Image (cartoon, rainbow, N blue to C red):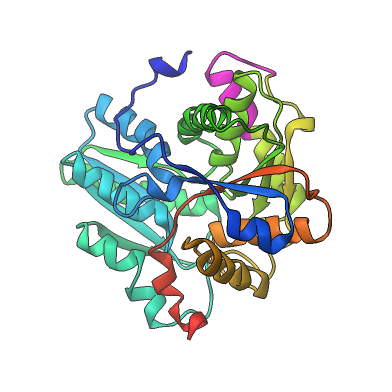
Amino acid sequence: MPLADFPRVRLAHTPTPFEPMDGLTKLLGGPRLYVKRDDCTGLAMGGNKARQLEFYLGEAKAGDADTILITGAVQSNYLRMAAAAAAKLGMACEIQHEERVPGMGADYHSSGNVLLDRVLGATIHTCPGDADEKAADAALEAIAGDVRARGGRPYVIHLGEDHPPLGALGYIDAAREVLDQASQAGLAMDLIVVPSGSALTHVGMLIGLRLAGSKVPVLGICVRRGGDEQADRVLRRASEVADMIGKPGLIGAEDVWVDDRVLAPGYGIANDETLEAISLAARHEGLLLDPVYSGKALAGLIGLVREGVIAPDQTVVFLHTGGTPALFGYQSLFG
């Protein structure tokens, strides 16, 4: 099925900027670093999820849904952007906060994305932090049952792998943008670096590049699970997306590259490398990263440069997935 045949609503401001990171390039002594600014997608402070939501909300509208349901961490950028998309399209939104990150204080539970969830009018539910993806999805389905009982028409954006990865389709378009922008700048890219969690951004970028005939590697920096588990997930999800668009076998194991060097001590917990990366991006590029996704992804990139895995003469594009509001939930780390 061609990409154009999937139901879609336009939510993101695209193409997003493609810019050199001269300050970090100089600081690290190479490689030549560029940033794809998907923090500038424009939906309620932006982020990568705007591209993904275009396809989920497209299917929801095509099915005459009137309520969007979604689950994620308390400071989830996805929940905030889903609430914004629902509001824009005249739909209700019910979100489920999963207590994934232990030991967080009042700011984490009241500011940043949580504040914006409330401003955007979302109904907020909670879920235990030890719930896995299937359990979180099951709790979301129970909320959907309540919506139906009230006469509503819910559309559930599931977290787990038991459901089609529609969100990845948005990054097929993003891959084309990156290729066009790099070509216009006269660049030959050696690597694209992305955060890899649910893996849909990672997968969409990889699929989009290969569809365009590009062999540029995509490195996913792990933000939720270890490297072996994440690599398996990326390959499974990529195979599903390739099948969805009528291109089975497009992605093989040789296309999947992940690195979990900055994952510890776990999802949503900022380590020293991540805090350093956030500081360096802010003070040398004027870029605001978050401790969960974009900050860890840049930390992983910096680590690979310092270890010589990425050579000084290479050209690397870093995908900034947004997450600025989450910084306010972590303000105690920057005191």
Which residues, given as a range, are shown in magenta?
A: 237-249
Tell me where residue 278 sits by quadrant.
Answer: bottom right
Q: Is residue 293 magenta?
A: no
Nearer-the-camera pick, 252 or 187: 187
| Residue 13 percent across, percent down from the top left | 33, 38
Magenta segment: does it hold 238? yes
From this view, report whether residue 283 is shown above or below residue 41. Answer: below
Q: Residue at x 16, y 46 (%)?
A: 150
Q: In the shown orientation, is residue 46 left or right of residue 91?
A: right
On the image, which quarter does residue 107 sit in? bottom left
Q: Up-down: is 8 above or below 264?
A: above
In screen coordinates, is 4 left or right of 219? left
Q: Position of residue 228 (x, y in %)?
A: 77, 48
* 271 w.r.t. 75: above or below: below
Residue located 78% across and 45% down the image? 313
Residue farthest along the right direction in this orientation: 308
The answer to whether one can see residue 223 in this image is: no
